[in-house]
Structures are given as structure tokens and as C-alpha cells.
Image (cartoon, rainbow, N blue to C red):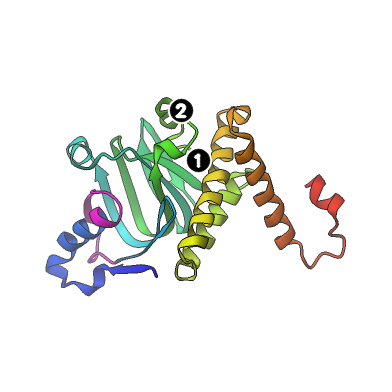
Amino acid sequence: MAIRLRAEGEPARTRTEYWHHAVGTALVPYQLSAVGAALRSEIRLSQLGALTVLDFHMSALRAVRRSGLIGKSDMGLVKVDSGIRGRGRCEQEGRQNLLAPGEFQLADLSRPSHVAIDESQGIAIAVFPLSLLPVRERGLRELAAVRFAADGPYASLVASLGREVTRRLDAYDSVRGARVGAAFLDMLALAVAARLDRVADLPPESRQQAILSRAQAFIEGHLADPGLAPATVAAA
């Protein structure tokens, strides 16, 4: 069962303070400030195996994670943002990315970062320990705030899986949730390894599971196609 948190449930005068606490508990601490009208934001949160998954919708705001906050809450975590609606800018390691629907990006929660949302945005967030991603800290720094575009063969599946998972947060029991979380990590590992040109470094089982996930996604997307056949799937 997903946990739901809503900023609008608090009076306007205490809303930002409450949302600092809510985001810090559900994700990690950020320094938040609303832009324009009173803050409006909602989180649905669930645990899928090793993944903490958040369906996060927010009005215009700024979110900063500085060294002081990191020192109080550094647990070696990685954050994956998959765009659902709207756009928002993420800055980390001297780079800036404008996240759009259908794309995803990585953020190292052990490093300073800045997020700017000018209107409103909906994102699917997955948080997990860096140790679960087959990339060293240096490799993660190379990819922080880097755009994984929707036309990438693996990136598009990572983003779409992130969106689909958040749509169905209430549908997973602990066993199915753990399997979904593992499938997400396998696909993400392949997308990251492909970007770093290190696919050969992945464990064989991770590559096989990621390929299976791609095949299943292709089949489900072409069920109405009379030309769907094993050869078609293999070619894709």
C-alpha cells in the first residue's frame, strides 16, 4: 500500500516547513522554496524491494541539497528521475539538464545539487544504494545530470518502466514489488553501461534480464500487429 503525502493538507503559513520534513523523510533533506503562489505538492511512496519509489508532483519551486544537509543524511544513495509531466532543471557536477517527459536522469545524493521547476512537474523517482548499480562513484559523477533521451533503446524503457511503476504503486505486494524493483535495476544498469561503453562489464544475468525486459516490452506494444512473430521480435 502506497503512502500519500500532500502539502495542501497543511495551512499556508506552515506548509513549507511541513514539506521540508515530508521530503526529508520520504527522500532526503533538501532546502525548499516555493516560487510564486503557495506550495502545492504531493508524493505517493512505496518500497519495491531495494527501491524506494515516489510518484512526485510539485508546483514551481527550488530545491537545493548542500554539503551541510548531505553531512547529516549521506547514505550513499542514487536517485533516478523519470519525466512524466512538465519540465525541470537539475544541476550537478557542473552540468545542467532539462528533464522532459519520456527521459530520465541520475543524481548522486551524496553530492551537492540544485533543482529548479518554473511551472509544475510530475516525475517518477527511484532511490537506492549506489552499491546496487554496477558503476563506481567516478562513473556516477560522469553521468550526474546527463540527459538519457527518449530515443535511446534502453533509456526509453527505463523511463517508461519508472512511469508505469508509479501508476501501479498500490498493486504490488512485497514479492511482486521486489521483482519489479530488480527488473528496473537490471534495465537501468544496461542503460548506464551502454552510456559508459561498458556493457561487457555487466554480469551475464543482468544483460539477459534486461534483454528479456526489452523483448517483453516490444511484444506488449505490438500485440495488435498481425506481423508479430518470433523473427520480428528477434530483429527488434
Numbered label attached to residue 147 = 1
Tag 1 secondary structure: loop
Question: How many labels sit on residues?
Answer: 2
Marks 2 and 1, how far apart at CA: 15 Å
Name which quarter of the figure residue 26 lies in. bottom left
Q: Give the camera-side residue of 208 and 42.
A: 208
Name which quarter of the figure residue 152 lies in. top right
* Range drawn in magenta: 24-40
Taking 129 as reference, is 235 left or right?
Answer: right
Q: Give the camera-side residue of 152 and 234.
A: 234
Name which quarter of the figure residue 200 lies in. top right
The answer to if 90 sits in the magenta stretch is: no
Numbered label attached to residue 139 = 2
Tag 2 secondary structure: helix
First in sequence: mark 2 vs mark 1: 2
- Name the amino acid, label 2: Gly
